Amino acid sequence: MSDTTMRPRRWPSVRRLPLTGPLRLVRPSDMWLKPASSVVVATAIPNLVLFSIDRLDLVMYTMAGSLCALYGHSLPYVRRARTVVGVVLGMLAGLAVSLVTASLTDSAAVLIAVGALLAAGQKLLCDATRIGPPGPLILTFVSSAALFSPQQLGQVPGHLALTLGAGAVSWLVTVAGPALIRREGPERLATARALNAAAAYAAEPGDRTRHAAVASVHAAWQTLLAAGRPTPARRALERLVVHAEAVLATDAPAAAGEATAADPALLRDWAARTRARGPVPTPPAAAGTAAELFGIDAERAVLTTTAPGEARRALLRRLGPGSPLLPVAARALVGCALAGYVSYAVGVGRPYWAIVTAASLYQANITLSWNRTLQRTLGNLLGVLVFAAVLPVTRTGPLALIGFCLFFSFAAEALITRNYWLGSVAVTPMALLVLEYAGSHPAGELIGDRILDTVIGAAVGFLAAMLVTNRRATSRVETALAATELARAHAVQTLAAPGPGPAALEAARRGLTGSLVELREANDTAAGEWWQRDLPQEKVLAAERAGHRTLTATATRQGLIAPAPENGAV
């Protein structure tokens, strides 16, 4: 046997980067209208107030608070209320640092360094808290722009008060208004997604559809558990998620024309009715539903009493030494600083857009960062052309300027879920038009600086991503693998115990489900990262298969599905 055949198969250190795939359009998100309409309302109210008192030069500060309306739309209202408050406070903190720094120094070197530190810190905190889209980019855009805006120290409190006031409007628009109109809206949407994902798996069983369905069901449970006390509607939603889980626990799709809980058409019908404004559909009671709901209530009671402390400890673990988030934050720090300094060196007077461009690139791994680099560059360059086309119209009057800013705010959210580059075509002119509120700038200078900043920020930012390696990506896979094996062992031990209670079975099954989701996320992240040692692919696949078998056995024990004719090992 040759020496070549005896060598173990190695995961390549450098992976091929795609060129056309990242630019393909996809179906829009099922909830794009909510952030789009929220940010328009939250922006229009303070803008019109400032217009009425002839102080549109202050729009930049109210815009900082208005953009907070983009956050939290997938969360239940109880958690959304806290999340949007946290975003507003984070926005205030970043803006305060920027405004105070701008009032104390005009040194570009200092301003760029502070901007890079803020961008890295915002990236780390948003990833650690899993704030969700749009993530740290909005915070970085506001704080970086404020660093290069003329400022006096005595003006800072008033400007921050404007941001706080607009942030309060965002909270009312994002939380208070929708909660009064549709109390269980986020829970219904999360449940409908779980049902649709289960339908996709029932129609086409496979690893891809199973992973997507497991993640959707897990997200639905997280939403329902975070929603507060169980109302009749939420209890009905929980029963629907139980049925979605039962589908994942079976390996065979429903027979043609057979209306069972695993029938894709039935699941999609339930999803459509759940998403609508009518009553929540009531599925036939599955065996074990009572035990399942008892376990959910037990978990909800535990979360109610221990969640705050556990959440703080989990956040500190994600921020502490050894965190897999630190290399990405380091990339942001190095890339944003280098992009800012290079841009300033070639003659851009306010290189904040180079910092923002670099900050926008850093995703979970190199491959995703490359995808974002292509998307950002194309979107920004096309967006500059759109800005050049509409600029003469916006200068006809303040109402025209306000109208175009609102239009581009709405268009950005309507388009960005189809592909990031398409949304950037609308974001770029909106960001440039905000500068017009403080007074007209030479169009050629604005356009030239923005093109230069985009190219430099994208090139230097991605170079930093390649140079700052993330050696912890594989370690995270190994840690997640160990956690999955431990969760599976606990589930097997619970199954072997004489007469395990519903709450114990539910806790074991939920813990194993969460660990499988974390394992898949860690593996996907590491698979797109460069300069890695061999990934334990065989172990990951074996752990996933064993975990799914154990989940099936646990669901069978709970009565969620009928026992298989021949039971395999758990």
Image (cartoon, rainbow, N blue to C red):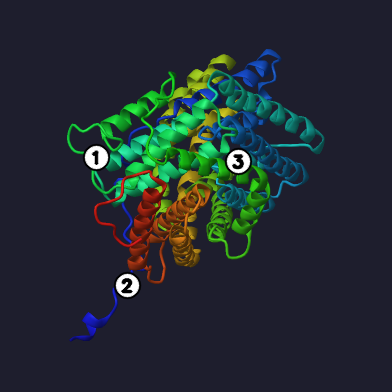
Q: Nearer the viewer, residue 380 or 67?
A: 67
Please identify, in this view, whether the residue under mark 2 or under mark 3 is nearer the observer. 2
Q: Residue at x 27, y 51 (%)?
A: 564
Labelled disc at residue 139: 3
Q: Nearer the viewer, residue 73 or 12?
A: 73
Q: Residue at x 62, y 27 (%)?
A: 170
Image location of residue 268, percent across then percent down: 31, 30
First in residue order: circle 2 vs circle 3: 2
Q: Nearer the viewer, residue 424 or 315?
A: 315
Q: Dot 1 corresponds to which residue?
A: 203
Q: Is residue 203 above or below residue 108?
A: above
First in residue order: circle 1 vs circle 3: 3
Q: Secondary structure at mark 2?
A: loop
The amino acid type, in three-letter code, at marker 3 is Leu
Disc 2 and disc 3: Cα gap in Å? 40 Å
Relative to 521, 63 lies left or right: right
First in residue order: circle 2 vs circle 1: 2
Labelled disc at residue 10: 2
Disc 2 and disc 1: Cα gap in Å? 35 Å
- How many residues crowd around disc 3 within 10 Å: few (fewer than 14), some, or many (20 or more)? many
Quarter of the image where one finds residue 341: bottom right
The amino acid type, in three-letter code, at marker 1 is Ala
Image location of residue 405, percent across then percent down: 53, 24
The amino acid type, in three-letter code, at marker 2 is Arg
The quarter of the picture where the C terminus appears is: bottom left
Determine whether label 2 and label 3 are within 8 Å by CB: no
- How many residues crowd around disc 2 within 10 Å: few (fewer than 14), some, or many (20 or more)? few
Q: Secondary structure at mark 3?
A: helix
Relative to 172, 331 lies left or right: left
Q: Is residue 418 above or below residue 453?
A: above
Residue 112 shows up from this direction: no
Relative to 198, 187 lies left or right: right
